[in-house]
Image (spheres, helix red, strand yellow):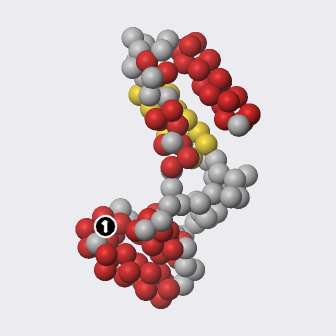
């Protein structure tokens, strides 16, 4: 397991309201998707700024809007060569965000039923 904990929240819809925080982590086999996402992933990985610029330019050539969005999002937060700290190759909160759709209906349950639903879901995932 990598030394990064990804935290995200989902709003509870029951009468109790509140936010359920979800913490996840990635193993060594994590992968991103294809197309522009793949180009962005490739642009985020170089250790040298020159290599980053070449790959990031490929993204901008496909979509200036995506290039502007990524630049406005602060390149130091997602590009390896621009980051000053340790990232451990993790550039996304997708593992935590993937829990939200799975909890779409259960998050309307009372707290005890919500926790029981999460336990059942995780048990099923680990079994499969």
Task: Give the vertical position of 72 relative to 48 (above or below).
Answer: above
The x, y position of residue 90, in whole percent, is: 58, 60
Task: Give the vertical position of 80 relative to 117 (above or below).
Answer: below
Left or right for 4, reference 108: right
At 31% across and 80% down in the image, what residue appears? 61
- The residue beneath circle 1 is 66
Task: Give the vertical position of 120 relative to 72 (above or below).
Answer: above
At 48% across and 14% down in the image, what residue appears? 109
Name the residue nearer the viewer: 98 or 76.
Answer: 98
Left or right for 45, reference 12: right
Task: Give the vertical position of 10 relative to 106 (above or below).
Answer: below
The x, y position of residue 14, in whole percent, is: 41, 15
Asked if one can make out residue 6 in the rendered structure from this viewpoint, the answer is yes
At 50% across and 86% down in the image, what residue appears? 51
Residue lying farthest front?
Answer: 128
Left or right for 31, reference 12: right
Q: Quadrant of residue 128?
A: top right
Name the residue nearer the viewer: 84 or 95.
Answer: 95
Q: Quadrant of residue 88?
A: bottom right
Residue lying farthest left?
Answer: 65
Please tell me whether mark 1 sits on a helix, a strand or a loop.
helix
The x, y position of residue 70, in whole percent, is: 35, 66
At 51% across and 56% down in the image, what residue appears? 92
Disc count in the image? 1
Q: Label 1 neighbourhood size at 10 Å, few (<14), some (14-19), many (20+)?
A: some
């Amino acid at each position: 397991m990598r030394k990064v904990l990804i935290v995200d929240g989902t709003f509870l819809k029951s009468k109790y309201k509140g936010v359920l925080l979800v913490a996840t982590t990635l193993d060594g086999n994590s992968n991103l998707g294809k197309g522009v996402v793949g180009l962005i992933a490739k642009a985020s990985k170089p250790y040298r700024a020159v290599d980053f610029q070449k790959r990031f330019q490929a993204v901008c050539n496909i979509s200036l809007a995506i290039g502007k969005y990524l630049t406005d999002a602060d390149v130091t937060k997602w590009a390896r060569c621009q980051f000053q700290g340790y990232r451990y190759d993790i550039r996304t909160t997708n593992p935590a965000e993937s829990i939200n759709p799975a909890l779409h209906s259960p998050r309307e349950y009372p707290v005890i039923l919500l926790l029981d639903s999460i336990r059942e879901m995780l048990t099923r995932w680990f079994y499969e």
